[in-house]
Image: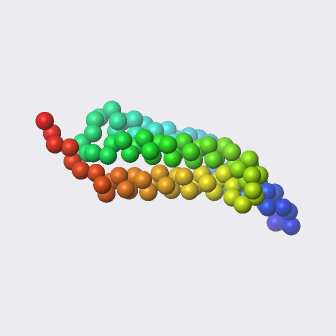
């Protein structure tokens, strides 16, 4: 690597770290299908509304992913890619929180 600017170095890393779009698509489709399946089967536990918050963090992560350069250009402190990972990690933590706080729903 040369003494390029940080954005040029980030481009260099990003170009070499790309994986197949098919792999990315497959993972995202399966995650969405599992969530839809969970919603269609009906709740056996409380805290089902937490899935909406998880979807919100996922959507936020996707927005940060698409706005990588504009986010970095705002202050040259943090990139959209970094914020994408933070939003995705927060979604994962929210799921753990949901699992800790949920309770079984009494069957009729």
Position of 35 relative to 80 (above/below) = above
Relative side of 89 to 64, left or right: left
At x 51%, y 47%, the residue is 57
Position of 27 relative to 9 (above/below) = above
Q: How many marks?
A: 0
At x 85%, y 62%, the residue is 4
Color theme of the render: rainbow
At x 59%, y 41%, the residue is 22
Q: Residue 10, located in which quarter of the rendered image?
A: bottom right
At x 72%, y 60%, the residue is 77
The location of residue 53, given as percent across then percent down, is: 44, 45
The location of residue 36, given as percent across then percent down, is: 39, 35
Quadrant of the frame with the N terminus: bottom right
Name the foreground residue: 27 vs 88: 88
Relative side of 59 to 71, left or right: left
Quadrant of the frame with the C terminus: top left
Name the foreground residue: 82 vs 28: 82
Q: Residue 46, located in which quarter of the rendered image?
A: top left
The answer to whether residue 23 shows anywhere in this view is no
The answer to whether residue 52 shows anywhere in this view is yes
Position of 87 relative to 34 (above/below) = below
């Amino acid at each position: 690597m040369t003494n390029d600017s940080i954005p040029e170095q980030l481009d260099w890393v990003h170009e070499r770290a790309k994986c197949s779009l098919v792999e990315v698509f497959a993972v995202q489709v399966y995650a969405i299908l599992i969530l839809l399946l969970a919603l269609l089967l009906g709740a056996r536990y409380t805290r089902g509304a937490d899935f909406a918050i998880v979807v919100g963090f996922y959507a936020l992560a996707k927005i940060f992913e698409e706005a990588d350069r504009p986010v970095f250009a705002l202050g040259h402190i943090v990139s959209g890619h970094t914020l994408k990972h933070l939003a995705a990690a927060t979604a994962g933590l929210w799921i753990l929180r949901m699992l800790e706080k949920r309770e079984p729903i009494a069957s009729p």
